[in-house]
Image: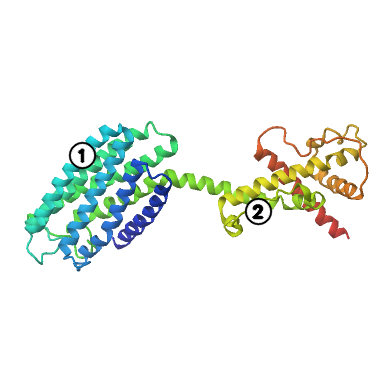
Amino acid sequence: MSLLLTLYGVGSFLVLAWMAHRLTRAPRDVPLWAVTGLIACWAAAYPFGLAADSEEVFLGLAPMTSRLVQHILVLAAVNCMVCFYLFSALEPARARRRAGWYALALMGAVAVLIAAVAATPEGTRTRDHTVTGVAVFFVTADLYLAVGFALGWMWSRRYARIAEPRLARGLRITSLGMAAIVVADALFVPAVLMRWAGGDGAPASLDTAGAAETALGWFGAVFFLLPGIVLILVGVTYPAAVMRLTALRVWWRHLRAYHGLEPLWTALHRRFPEDALHRVPVRPWRDALSPRGVHRRYYRRAVECRDGLVRVSPYLAALDGGSGGDGAGTEGAVPPERLAPRLREALRAHAAGRPVSTSAVPVAVPAEGGLDADVERLLALSRALRDVERGGRGAV
């Protein structure tokens, strides 16, 4: 139980930081505000719940008051979830009206919680369900949560059927978490009533912190409530996380390609330094570490390699006298292993200032595909050129 509570707390704060970052990019996105409010309420409720579970004074608040603050935040989180679906599916005016009715229901539930806490004798343990005030408090909160998450489960499944695949997977994961919380609340209500009616508590061997003090309540908390919260956090962040993961894969591919093109780029840049694109970033260190900087250097190196090959291509064609074979017009079809030594020879011919009468020809050009296919051919040539240079040094 303690491990699950820790994961819940840490996960809530990490996801809250993620959502706050997203809000800075879309400050007018009302559904995003609603999801951020959901996570913020969960994260803020965590320390109050810990203080109430340990029966300690927190921020000058008595344990039962901390329990009240915790549940007000949790119930507010449910309303944020409801607002997310309302503002995602309805017109703004209609969504605001529906959200207003749900806000009235929240205020009614909060009023019952406050009255229950006021009726609870001072010094009562926050989970002593044998006390009527405490029992009313938890039954009210659990029923409200069960209804709210049942609605969320229904809407999540409905929208998952029409959403794009990535968002649909996130909604399905979220719906599983909501279903688990509904089951947990459905177990908590009879567990509280059993305890209030004088039923036996959970065995002493069970860690019941944060759960109803019966075996049924412990089962609901461990196997449904906390896993359900984790699933909701995963589902909420899944679409954005997958997008970031895809971007990270592209970043890694571009970084590897940038370094993989170095042998070819070095050989060409040595002969044609005028082809370098001399755009200097304003902040070099930040540019070196940022994803955009990696992409920019990748595209620049690919363009510079291609420009260099265009310049040296007449010398490649002249190696065969500009007539057929692997010469004029056919360099794009020459395998990299055969093209690399010829490229070295052509660069030496350019350095020696030999005159050529042939025009530029395609070099290492893919039969089809876009920039990625073009870079793959350049990478193959770069690797072959590196092997040739290593072989040449070995021979010396």
Q: Residue at the location (68% across, 47% down)?
A: 300
Residue 218's x, y, as percent? 22, 56
Decide which of 158, 345 is in the foreground and name it: 345
Which type of secondary structure does the marked residue at label 1 adopt? helix
Q: Is residue 212 visible?
A: no
Seen as rendered, the residue at the extreme front is 282
Q: Nearer the viewer, mark 1 or mark 2?
A: 2
- Crowding at label 2, few (<14), some or many (≥20) Cα neighbours within 10 Å? few
Sequence-first tag of 1 and 2: 1
Depth order, front residue of 215/66 = 66
Q: What residue is rendered at 65% in x and 53% in y?
A: 280
Of residues 315 and 203, which is closer to you in this image? 315
Residue 323 located left or right of residue 13 = right
Residue 231, position in %: x, y?
35, 48
**Disc 1: CA contacts within 10 A as few (<14), some (14-19) or many (>=20):** few
Q: Which residue is mark 2?
A: 280
Q: Residue at coordinates 39% horizontally, 55% vertically from top-left? A: 17
Q: Which residue is mark 1?
A: 100
- In the shown orientation, is residue 67 left or right of residue 358? left
Q: Is residue 75 above or below residue 160?
A: below
Q: Does the rendering let one see residue 386?
A: yes
Work out whether 197 lies above or below 121: above
